[in-house]
Amino acid sequence: MDDLIADFVAECREMLEALGGEIVAWEAQPDDRARLDSIFRFVHTVKGNCGFFEFPRLEALSHAAEDALADVRAGRRHPDGALVSAVLAIIDRIGEMVAAIEAGEDMPAGDDNHLIDALAPGAEGTAAPVVTAAEAATKASSAPRTIRLSVELLDRVMSTVSDMVLARNELARRLRESANDVPVDGAFERLSSIIAEMRDAITRTRMQRIENLFVGLPRMVRDLSAELGKQVLVDIEGGDVELDREMIEMIRDPLTHIIRNAVDHGIEKPADRLKAGKREIGLLAVSARQSGNQILIDIQDDGRGIDGRKLVEKAVSNGVISKDDAAQLSPRDQLALIFEAGLSTAKEVTAISGRGVGMDVVRSNVERIGGIVEVDSKPGEGTRMTLRVPLTLTIIPALTVSIAGQHFAIPRSAIEEIVRANGESVTLEHVGGAGVATIRGRRVPEISLAAVLGLDSSVGEQDRTLVVLRPAGGDVYALSVDRIHDHEELVVKPAAPAVMATGLYAGTTLADDGSPILLFDPAGIAAVGGVKLEMQERTARIAEGPTATISKATPVLLFRGLDGGRRALRLAVVDRIEEVPASAVKEAAGALRVQLGEAILPLAGATAGEIGDGKVRLFRLNDGQHEIGYAFAEVIDFATIDHDIIHAERPGEISGVSLVNKEPAELVDAHWLFSNHAAAAAPTKEELVCLIPDWDPWMQNMLRPLVEAAGYRVVDDSENESADVVIACLGEELPEHASHKTIWLRTEPEAASKKDFSIYRYDRAGLLMALKSAGAGRGK
Amino acid sequence: MNELLLVVTIAGERVALPANAVESVVELDTLIPVPRAAPHVAGLSALRSRVLTVIDCMRSLELGDTDCSDGIREAAVVELDGHHYALIVDLVEDVVEAASDPVPVRAAMEQGWERVSHGMVETEQGPLLLIDVAALVAGVEAKAAA
């Protein structure tokens, strides 16, 4: 809150200083419209800000002055000497109060009513202010230790620092060439680090996260909506977009105005909303994002929208446009009238807004920094205001890449991931000449940067690196580049029009060695490269959500089997993914086998009939000793299992079913695969077999992993195998294999009698001991 | 006060640039090409911490290419709408005073020259063609689009 007050005070002081001359000029020439407007804006701003802080006296004063001036602006009143003096007295009083706020003192004593009364038409001369503004200002010596610098000066410092860095680099080169001199090198190192530090600091002075601007919004909207008897939910997004400090200051007022308008005029009262079939709570979404060399700030409400025709009527009646012109306006142009001075569609004037000041100021403020304000609205559905401000002189983190030996930069904000074209989970294909990259089962359009730029790359297609990009508002595509170099923070400057005309670049920047680098505009490359945007892909990605936060989750590879089944395999057992011609798969010695290089591996996941004529893709699974292949159709994604696993009734290739990425998937039992395939392939070591009743879920789910971990293969009665050990619950009938060693389990911790050799079923150590001794016993 | 002119040679022809438009004369060494840009944009170069857009005057005039392969080229740096450009010329000769206002050349000039000239000025060194820097920077395509 203190920060906000400090901002308010600073803003008022600045405006007061600027107004100083205007006031005198207005006094001499009360008809001067431009001066009247600027004084009007001042009191309007003060009034608006006072609403958020508790300065009732300030608010009363400014509201009164605003009323009087609004009458003058509307032509209802002629500015006479008495009025001018009265307004000046009020501005002086505002100045005193602001000075008092700044110094942290109480408000100057005194009654403001005589000042307000003096504004009334026909009132007599004015009272002199109790204390003059000049005196009050001298008291404010305990101001915070900040100074306001002109951005020009900062720019000069910044460019000097940049030059200094380049000079240092040159010096470094010279030093390397000449003979080594240790003291000189040491001094140079020191200089280097100081310069780097200085550059950092000076860079930071200019950049701010837009969050600083957004942080006050929820409070503002809350207070506003409370005052107006409305319910508004604010949704803020993109606070991490970095913006030039100057830019942030410049868009602060426009943004405040727009939001104020949205809450005041856009969003209806709860009762009206219900009548219109909307939710009681209005939604106000504020988002910031970077698009090419611009920052876009959207302010969207779901209120009543703007009626273009009403705007036109008003504009015609106010003489802003002629009737003939009005008839020719497109709907868009009609809405754009909102930015004309002196227009407001609000029927009543409230304390918040509605005098038609604001939108014209918004536009002029935004245009002054080279930005644009756009408005889009549907009556009854809501309004969207978009501020587009340039990204000049912003520092953006970028990735430098090279193609045909030339370096380029890509804004890091657009980069999703980086993969090697010849990586395991990546395949590159050409469909009708267009590149399609399949990255972990997701197909994305692929553009060769060399082709877009018309450069010859000496790097083969398979050796390139794919940078997966998601331009702001666009869709994912992969850009293949020769090489990735470095992450750098770059100061981006706009390029010459002839360069920008290509549509490929967002600007230029200087690398550390002083050579220019072009910064790509990812959306521009997509457009030039001919990528078509698909909206559904985006929604599909959003649904995924943050799965990585669950620490206990097991990472799995989600894939589609040859029979089309959605399966998952624990990631840890997958060694790598191979692709072999179908001819490498043979049915030999009673099982499917695949030849991989010198090795012949058993192949699971497929029957002979499912292997086509083309290529077979398979996972190479490894348990440390054996390898087997598992054929599949395609990899869907990496995922984690965070839902309960419903175990299969019988042991087999599938150990259970679980929800993976919100859809059921069968879990492939790697243990079973190895026990069935690898054991057959390399029967060097005989396994211990343990029989567990298949009807007992506790045994299957809880005991089984423990038994398997102890080195046993688990079977049930249906498999006619001789088990080395049988586990059964106390009191149950023994299956037919009773001749084998049996481990009895009981459900109570305490043994019933001394003859009872059963083991409590949660006595892990006892169980393991029993299993171990049973295994050892077999050797005899 | 008569205008000062910078006499340069472009495509073997001695022409004059308005000296107050020229910030400095530099020697360019490294040139970073700009793929897909208009042909007369030879590339980018850095002058201290500024990025210069290098214009190949020969190509802008459609008189052929400047051979940039031999390394260092002389160029005149001009500023236009906040952007800095380096105009590659064959040779920077001298600064002279204009003795007259530019007058139209009545004889037919070659196409490229016609487009970029303000007219002819009299100097001590005889008549010289006065170049319109903005037209030179805009190049062929911008003109065609306009």
Image (cartoon, coloured by chain):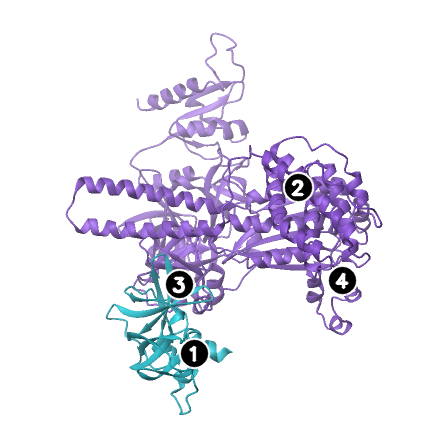
Chain colours: A purple, B cyan
Tell me the kind of residue under disc 3.
Answer: Leu
Q: Residue furthest bottom?
A: B107
Q: Earlier in the sequence, mark 4 or mark 2?
A: 2
Q: Which residue bears the numbered disc 4?
A: A311
Chain containing the residue with disc 2: A
Chain containing the residue with disc 1: B
Which disc, if any, is residue A624? none
Question: Residue A61 is drawn in which quadrant?
Answer: top right
Crowding near the residue tagged with mark 1, few <14, some 14–19, many ≥20 C-alpha atoms within 10 Å: many
Q: Residue furthest left?
A: A179
* Alpha carbon distance from label 1 to label 3: 27 Å
Q: Which residue bears the numbered disc 2?
A: A95
* Residue A69 appears in the rendering: yes
Mark 3–mark 2 contact, CB under 8 Å? no
Q: Which residue bears the numbered disc 3?
A: A449
Chain containing the residue with disc 4: A
